[in-house]
Image (cartoon, grey):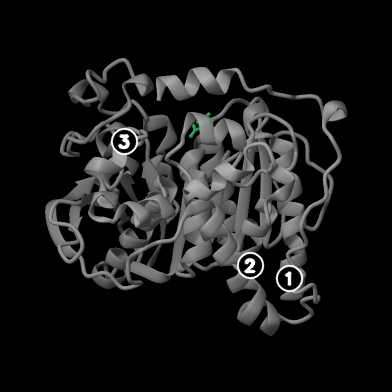
Amino acid sequence: LAVGKAVAQKIPVNYDESQMPAYTLPNPLVLSNGKPVTSVSVWEKTRRPELLKLFAEELYGVNPFPSTIKSTVEVKTVNENALGGKAISKQITLRFPTISPTAALNVLLYLPKNVKKAPTFVSLNFTGNHSTTHEKEVLVTENWVNSGFDKSFVNNRATEASRGIAERRWPYEAIVARGYAVATAYYGDLEPDHAEGWRTGIRSVLTPEQREKWSALGVWAWSMSRMVDYLIQHEGQIDAKKIIGVGHSRIGKATLWAGAEDPRFAVVISNDSGEGGAALARRWIGETVEHLNTQFPHWFCANYKKYNKAVAELPVDQHELLSLIAPRPLYVASASKDTWADPKGEFLSAVEAGKVYQLYKKTGLGTSEMPAVNTPVGQTIGYHLREGGHDILLYDWEQYMNFIDKHIKIQ
Ligand code: GCU
């Protein structure tokens, strides 16, 4: 990882729009044979599958597992009085014995009291479930963690000292107070985030060829879908039709891919996902495909590296990933100081995805003018530019809940 970072730092970075070469975006509404997509049925039967296949083969990887996976469920703890009595919390370990003897995904779930069927956020965290809260019963992750993420991590292991370090990103009390449930798991459970992480993760059971065709981001997206399997089968209090995928940064990239692959995500939210997420790849601003593939060679599949110096040859761009969410509500958020993620490129990508929403007679953003900071805009696609840096904060969650409240009813 350190080597990747040093090399990535030598790759030129541009932040100046006037220095950016012109680019042409591929049109989501043109089939690979050149014919236009003029109906929802052609989109759903032909164009959408074409795009999904391209994103799998060239970026996020081809998932080698069957679409239905049997998991075993072990409920480790239940607290009927979590968050000062406002919620029920549970910790559940999911295992997948038909594909791996060791893989385990540890889910932390908060259910609001007094809601019969809760819409539920599904997300992954960067530093372990215990880092999202100070609640004592939440188990400290035993998996590899990135020592660079926190001073309390020693030799890539977490300790009690890291309890609650990411609390600002997980405003559980505010979330359950609005009638939402929230489920999270450590993103490194099924693949630790480093170039050799596959060795101890779920990709270790694959042939080298299958492994290279898939990716770490693909595994993280897959983890989110396994959480959905559990939630809709086992948690009666959860509204299976109101599962919301949300993720920050690299997990935002994984979330968009999860939402594209898995239609059970009724709403999809990208928080500062940047390059390889919501941001248009063809814009030469901030991070580039080459930076991504150099610093994080395991995130995407091997094919993505072909575009390091040839981004115009990518058969897709990221607005087409966003359009795979249509007609479901989609929210893209940026932060004003997060120039590495190219906020304008994230916004323009959301504007472009609106074309596919129009095919469904829905309005996407309803504007092509980038809003001022802290001024949410949009209709079936939402967008805001939070003032500040690369993070996911209460302000972001509040805008997400305001947006979702407009689209779905809480019972
Ligand atoms: C790095 C990386 C980004 C990523 C971010 C994060 O900055 O270059 O692509 O989104 O880490 O996950 O926080």
Seen in the image, is 297 located left or right of residue 173?
right
Circle 1 — which element?
A: loop
Q: Which of labels 3 and 1 is toward the front?
A: 3
Amino acid type at circle 3 is Glu
Residue 140: x, y in percent? 19, 34
Amino acid type at circle 2 is Ala
The answer as to whether callout 3 falls within 8 Å of ligand 1 is no
Residue 142: x, y in percent? 17, 35
Circle 2 — which element?
A: loop
The answer as to whether callout 2 falls within 8 Å of ligand 1 is no
The mark that comes first in sequence, 3 or 1, is 3
Mark 1 and mark 2: Cα distance apart in space:
9 Å
Residue at image location 33% in from the left, 25% down from the top? 165
Residue at image location 33% in from the left, 55% down from the top? 112
Instruction: Characterize the local packing of mark 3: few (<14), some (14-19) or many (20 or more) Cα atoms within 10 angstroms.
Output: few
CB atoms of marks 1 and 2 within 8 Å: yes
Quadrant of res 172: top left
**Which numbered circle lies on residue 326?**
2
The answer as to whether callout 1 falls within 8 Å of ligand 1 is no
The mark that comes first in sequence, 1 or 2, is 2
Seen in the image, is 316 located left or right of residue 305?
right
**Which numbered circle lies on residue 362?**
1
Label 3 sits on residue: 196
Q: Quadrant of the C terminus?
A: bottom left
